Structures are given as structure tokens and as C-alpha cells.
Image (cartoon, rainbow, N blue to C red):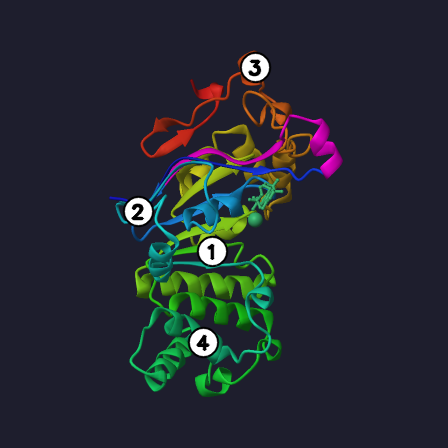
Amino acid sequence: MPLVKVENLVKHFPVRMNFIKALFTRERKKVHAVNGVNFSIEEGETLGLVGESGSGKTTMGRLVLRLEEPTKGRIFFAGREITSLSAEEMRRLRREMQIIFQDPLASLNPYMRIGEAIRHPLVIHGIGENKRKQREMVLEMLERVNLRPAEEFYNRFPRQLSGGQRQRVVIARALITRPKFVVADEAVAMLDVSVRSQLLKLMVDLKREFNLTYLFITHDLATTKYICNRIAVMYLGRIVEEGSFRDIYTDPLHPYTKALISAVPEPDPKAMERKKKLIPEGEVPNPIDPPSGCPFHPRCPYVKEVCRTVPPELKEYSGDRKVACYLYD
Ligand SMILES: Nc1ncnc2c1ncn2[C@@H]1O[C@H](COP(=O)(O)OP(=O)(O)O)[C@@H](O)[C@H]1O
Ligand SMILES: [Mg+2]
């Protein structure tokens, strides 16, 4: 049984219109942020959700945790459907499912000492007998994310920390309730390359230690290398390909995945030159008015007639690989 599963998940946002325009038009435009997504994540696995900015990754992550209400579709956690749980039931479940965002400064209260910020979820969920016990738990967690001496870090404010240290605080706060599932949304995107690899290593270590399952969201395929078992490639609200990290990397099937892989820097300049030719022309189309048929067809070098009209389904290609492309029918 997968720990997390979503079925036909759809999220459309209304497009804001000014009052006068709204009066004279009957058409209500929508942003098709997530357009019928299916995936599941086994316990202990890390699924990477990869795609360019605007492809719907953040919305997807928020839907899974029900921080966003789906327009359609179902969400399961540990075998239980959570799509229509009440706010109170969700609040209790939140201790088992956490999210880490891109910008640690924005997710920390500047006036709260970091020890207190990490202790806060314990208070909210009533974990730990008393304040002294909670403080001990926080100190232990600070040690665990390498913020030492923990006593000293406990009393510091976010602005007194580096970007990497702040993200360690955010991770500590997310893990203090001992969640089973963590959504990491561009969690290392804002950090320098050297700090990034340290943080990724920490996330891998913590995953093993706390038996975590991750949904690792990133626009940068290169960062999935250290952490992801499996990768789902998202384009304009749809998953276009899914497979093991190794398969996606060494033998991408979907023309969009091929393009993404080709954009990952290559140490050998000759190989880089060969790769460059694969990058497709054009930009990500607007999700307010997504193309008919395959969402990638306007940029695809292999486009056929059928691609313009009927969206290809995400189908099994072999073993645990899936692809949504008529090239593989
Ligand atoms: N609250 C919202 N209201 C309206 N449109 C939104 C909202 N959140 C996201 N969108 C739109 O949905 C699309 C997908 O956004 P997002 O999920 O943030 O993608 P990603 O994380 O891959 O960059 C974008 O076009 C974005 O502008
Ligand atoms: Mg995002």
C-alpha cells in the first residue's frame, strides 16, 4: 500500500477579472494549474516532481497536503481517503505530513527565537509533557540538523543565521512532530551550490533516520540526483513521464524530458554541444489557455497530427515506467 496516492487530481483557479469586465462577459476564465494527475509514493521512497516554473508543482504539493482544495480528484494518505476530511481532522493529521518551502526567511517569524519556532508545533499538537521536556526535544533536534552548540542556537533569531542554517531550522521544525511524509518544495533552490549539497545530504540522512517519505519538488533536475528514487516530470499541469531516477536520466522517453536532461550541465563540452540541439524552441504556454491535445505539442520536434487534438494518456511503457506520448504507442 502506498503511503500517498492521488487520483485524477485537478485544480483550476479562477482568473481575477475587474468588475466591469466581469459584468460583460459570461465566460469565466480559469488557470489550469493541475490537470488530471495520478501518482503514488511508497513508504520510504522519494518521488521527485520536476518541471519548469509554472507547470503546477507547488499547487500539486499543496493539494496533497490539502493546503489547497482540489477542483476534482481524490487524495489518500496511509490507505485512508483524506479528500473531504474536516479542518479539525486535517489539523490532527498535519503532524504526520509537513512541508518545507523554498525561502526559510519567509517561513520563519523574525521575532521568534529559533528554539521557540521549532518548539511551536509541539505546543500546537500537544506533544511533550511540559515546556522543559519540549525544550529538550528541540535541543536534540538542533543537534541532529547540525546547529551546534544547540543551546546557543536555541536563543538566536533568524536574521543571525546564514541561509543554510535557516533552512536547517525549517527542516528541524518540520521534523519535530515526527511526520511520516514531507513535501519539500524547492527546499534547496535558494542556497549556494556548496550549501545545497550539504542540505541534500542532511535530508537524505534524516530520511533514513526518521523513516521519511518525500515528495521532492524542484525545477532543477540536477538536484534530484542525490535524493530521488523515482521521478515524475510535469508539464502544464500534467505528468508526461514517470520512472526510476536512473531510467529518466540515462534514457528519457518524452521529448520534454529529453529537453530537460539536455539542459543539465555536462562536464564534457562535446557532449554538451550534442545535447544543446535538443532544447526545444518556444516558451511554456499559458495555463489559462492551454494548448489542445498534448500540452507539449507547440514545442515538440516530433509533433504529429494527433498530438494537436487528443491529449495522450500516461501509459505504462515497461515495468515501472510511464510516458504520455504518441511516439510510444
Ligand atoms: N492561488 C492562485 N491563483 C491563481 N493562479 C494560481 C494560484 N496559484 C498558482 N497559480 C497558477 O497556477 C500555475 C501553476 O503554478 P505553480 O503550482 O506555482 O507552478 P510551479 O510550482 O511549477 O512553478 C501558474 O500559472 C500559476 O500562476
Ligand atoms: Mg513552485
120 and 44: which is toward the camera: 120
* Residue 23 on the magenta segment: yes
Marks 3 and 2, the one that precedes in the sequence: 2
Q: What element carries label 1?
A: strand
- What amino acid is at disc 3? Lys
Q: Real-space Cα distance between discs 3 and 4?
A: 53 Å
- What amino acid is at disc 4? Asn
What residue is pinned by disc 1? 184
- What amino acid is at disc 1? Ala
Q: Real-space Cα distance between discs 4 and 2?
A: 28 Å
Q: How crowded is mark 2: few (under 14 residues within 10 Å), some or many (20 or more)?
A: some
Q: Real-space Cα distance between discs 4 and 1?
A: 19 Å
Determine contact: label 1, label 3, CB under 8 Å.
no
What residue is pinned by disc 4? 146
The residues colored magenta run 19-39
Q: Real-space Cα distance between discs 3 and 2?
A: 36 Å
